[in-house]
Amino acid sequence: MTQFVQNLIDGLGNGSTYALLAVGVSMLFGVMHLVNFAHGELLTMGAYVIYAMRSNDISWWVAIPVAILSAVVLSMLIELVAFRRVRAASAFTLLLTSFAIEILSHAAWRIGVSSTPRRYEAPDIAFKVVELGPFNIEIWDVVSILVAVACFVGTAIMLRTTMFGLAIRAASEDFDAARLMGVRANRVISGAFAYAGLLAGIAGAIWLVRRGQADPRMGAEPLLKAVIAAIIGGLGSLPGAVVGGLSLGVAEVYFRSWLPSDLQGLTDSFVFVVIAVLFVVRPQGLFNVRTAERV
Amino acid sequence: MAADRTAPLARTVTVARPTVGAPVRSQLRSVALPSLVGNLGFLVVILAIGALYASGGSSARDLLIGDLFVNLVLVLGFQVFIGNTGVLSFGHLGIASVAAYTMALLAVPSDRKTVLIPNAPWGIPEIELSPLAASLIGIGAGIAVAFLLGLVAARTSGLAATMITLAFLAIVRQVAENRKDLTGGAQNLSSVPRIDGWTWPVVGAAIAVGVAVMFRSSKVGRYAVATREDELAAGAMGVEVFRPRLIAFVVSGALVALGGILRVQSLGSIGPSQFSFEFTILILAMLVVGGMRTVTGAIAGTVLITVGKEVTRFLGDGPNFLGFDWPVVDGLPDLFLAGALLAVLLTRPNGLLGEFDLGRWLTRHFVRRPARAATPGSESAPEAGDAATADVPTDPVVSAVAPAGPAPADEALTTAGLGVVFGGFTAVDDVSIRVEPGRIHGLIGPNGAGKTTFVNLLTGLVEPTTGTVRIGDRELTGAPYRRARAGVSRTFQNLRVFPALTVRENIAIADLVAHDHRSHRPGVSVDELLALSDLEHMADRSAATLDYGNQRRLEIARAAALRPDFLLLDEPTSGMSSAESLAMVDHVRRIATAIGSGVLVIDHDLGFITNICEYVTVLDQGAVLAEGTAAEIQRDQRVIDAYLGSQHG
Amino acid sequence: MILEVDRLTTRYGALTALHAVSLHVAVGELVALVGPNGAGKTTLLSSVVGLLRPANGSVRFEGTDVTGADPAANVARGLALVPERRRIFKDLSVAENLRLAGATVPKSQRKARMEEMGELFPVLRTKWDVSAGYLSGGQAQQLAVARALMCEPKLLLLDEPCLGLAPTMVDVIFELLDQLRAQGRTILVVEQQAQRVLSVADRGYVLRTGEIVAEGSGPELAGRSDLFDTYVGGS
């Protein structure tokens, strides 16, 4: 039982990063049917910004907001330069475009900085553990979970109450009808990229404080997990993305603790197999998303 | 006036030779052969340039040429699946990895294995096969894995398939890294027997070109392409999605397995990171840049990216070149790769070559087709067509006579209590109609009356809440492709031709299905259908370039090629002028006579419907409002009301 | 003239859906656009508001050239379209549908506009917080119209407002048309029930295969049975 709860806390801490990224991925899919594999590059951007600021002894209190802001700006920039031109293209083209941007980003960091990782020191709070009864709780896990929950609640409120939120929901359902209501296509898409960038920036900040280094390819893996999370929840469904991200994080931790030691390295494989089975049974994901295809 | 317009099919008979496969097969040859010659020729040209380049330089140049041909095998392997089905797979290199590991584990000398992987299971350390035998077994393993993965990937569609294959790639890598006893883990497994020079890679590339070309022109390949072009329309033509995609997956898996084995054999070692996601993207970039839809495009892309990466790698190493000291730029090849990919995607999403195929191009420019008058179909068909048009108005008595033509099927298409409810909204409510064999039956109703939903119920796109559909005693059930094979083929309200295929290919696909599933019905050859539809002079144009009226007639010709018992036409005159509509009346009669099928025409245009149909059912608010002969319908006050609104009359 | 459409041509790939169509609407008029299905009516409205980019010709709204302008910008100018099949946002509540549609209205007036809509469509007022997906066809159509009215349009385009509605609901929609007209609104309506709508319209146009084949005062067109022959055969 103790182990069960301990794993749950670890898994939620883990999964909150996935979930924050997955909400962004799902939102972009909703408004323009894009599975954005370049989304993870926002984490890389944040990491190099943190590295640059920390190596100049700039406070974490400044470094983190600037890193988040840089993710927002980069996200909007990518939309403006690349995705705006292929907006009407097939999902296939959009997907490959996002990969091209991912490779471009990797190459740019290698050329601009170096392919060897750049290290910075994690702050003390990142690994601090407090004992609470039978549990060993890492402070940073709690911070991660609280920040993520705040983001989810904030996003839910944003989607219900603000004009931008209504526009996002409307555009995800029927883009042209939203335009007929006065929603500007460029603005809502650009706004979605900015918001997804903001969530990615926050996810990045949570993760980067502990990670302690920046390297060109670092964004690929968490993004892959986020995409999987978004798919589990049903692409386009934001609550689904949250559930998908958290359950993926938790599943990883449980698999890791249950698997015998010689199979530890196969944790991801087991998770993937479960997801593949899920897919065949429920191709639309856990949450049903309305798909509008007319004959 | 309306009365004699309601005459049924004319008695004139079109030459209805049953086609017995021969024309189809000869047509396959005529497509495959030039493409094979053209693309192998392309390969020879590349080989010659490569040999010239390598002859003047170091062994590094030999390696590069070898690499190029190995990449070609891999790219063509991807092309067979992705290019022909339009489904993006990230998992193929996982298949390559499995195949290459199998080969390596069997072929690495026993004395090396007892050192490298002494604890491997199944007595692997003792086994030592010849490289060729090991390679063949490796390919076999690749095929087996491709089959299993294909079972899953071909069943899901679109993005889901992409993600499953991606997960597969990750799993293969993780297993290779973790089963250290078997693979040596992250440590590369060395001492794989090496192939010298580039003979084998070239042979492999030639095989790959052959397989890719033959697959594209095979029956299964063309079915796969049809599902790529339009899954719905393919289903309506009796083409199943799953099987062709699975076969494409296995064939492409076999090629990729060959490529993976060649790659490992030219390197002499194998490791888990060799068939990585990054390498997958590289291969995909080669495919996308050149154009994934044709073999020529795949070859061109491979050469372009391989050469470009080599040049940028050279420049990135900081050489003294052209009297200038270049700076060292780490990552320049990747920058080139991303730039090339992005540039092509943003400007030419179908690749630099698009639909261009050397074989097709060569045929068009250097091979003379036999003069048109010499083909039997084009000679007889216009006569028949003319006769049909001439006969209809002059023979009012014909209405009493059973339609001639090739004997129509003698079973009626009936629906009993057919209905469907969408979330509380009853779109179609308890509709029972009977379409007599060989007769033209109209289904009409104002916009929103449920006409298209009714067609979707008949063809299986929508599952009914209540009721059944039958031809004679046979109940039609299941997916659209099953119903198409059972005798109901349709056209679509908003035109669904296979856009990238030529006019002839569009029709030939339905003809292929007919040959397998409708051979008990008399058919009309592809050439005759082209002539009947007045499309013969544009037979080799891609369907997307046709104008609206021609696309409409193409769609009808394609549906007719399936030799259906009943032809369902969903708003065939939508968007047409009255003159065009009138011409369509004759055209539909002519086609229906030629294949001896019954016709159910759905339209909102009462004028058109009463012109062409003997019997009309009127639908309003999802239910049958009235039915009867065209003349009766025109006099029916309820029908007039439904059309003009309650204020009229 | 509030709307002047001059020789507008629109294509979908191979199909030319509109051939140099010209028409105009004056302030305060109710103009009906009728014609068989596939004649290009929806294409015309979509081209006017900017959802489709015309190949040729021009659209002027209050004297300004708005050819190919962003539909959202046209809404801000006061040119609103109630699209065919309503296309309300089913996942949003009734109130949210209206609020979004009032995006171009200053925030201070938005609440008041919503209240007005509640008065104009009492049925909607009772369903304020219900997901629009649960509305019946007639209620959905009322919501669609209310949505377009939220931005206080100077010209209201209605595309097949009676499509798929029960006869009693059709009567309600025609009453609504009367009511809107009484308020002095300018309306261009596309309708299948040609003679009924023409009989209440000031002027009408008949569109067939992408061309205007007749125009005139509403009742005059309604009386010309020759125009509707191909519609109902030899009636």
Image (spheres, rainbow, N blue to C red):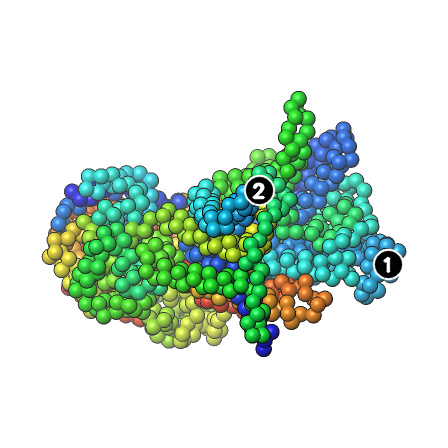
Q: Callout 2: residue from which chain?
A: A
Please report the residue visible at 23 percent of the width from the left and 70 percent of the height from the top.
Answer: C126
The type of residue carrying mark 2 is: Trp
Q: Which mark is residue B277?
A: none
Are labels 1 and 2 on one chain? no
Spatial CA distance of label 1 from label 2 is 43 Å
Q: Position of residue B332 (x, y in %)?
A: 61, 37
Q: Which residue is under mark 1?
A: B114
In the figure, residue B455 lies in which quadrant? bottom left
Please report the residue visible at 36 percent of the width from the left and 71 percent of the height from the top.
Answer: B423
Q: Position of residue B238 (x, y in %)?
A: 52, 61
Marks 1,2: beta carbons within 8 A: no
Residue at the outermost right position: B111
Please report the residue visible at 51 percent of the width from the left and 53 percent of the height from the top.
Answer: A205
Q: Is residue B523 left or right of residue B403?
A: right
Q: Is residue C122 above or below residue B393?
A: below
Task: For residue B445, say whether it is visible.
Answer: no
The type of residue carrying mark 1 is: Thr
Q: Which residue is under mark 2?
A: A109
Q: Is residue B490 left or right of residue C107?
A: right
In front of the other: B266 or A69: A69
| Number of other residues with Cα within 10 Å of mark 1, as a class: few under 14, some 14 to 19, many 20 or more | some
Q: Secondary structure at mark 2?
A: helix
Q: Secondary structure at mark 1?
A: helix
Please report the residue visible at 76 percent of the width from the left and 53 percent of the height from the top.
Answer: B187
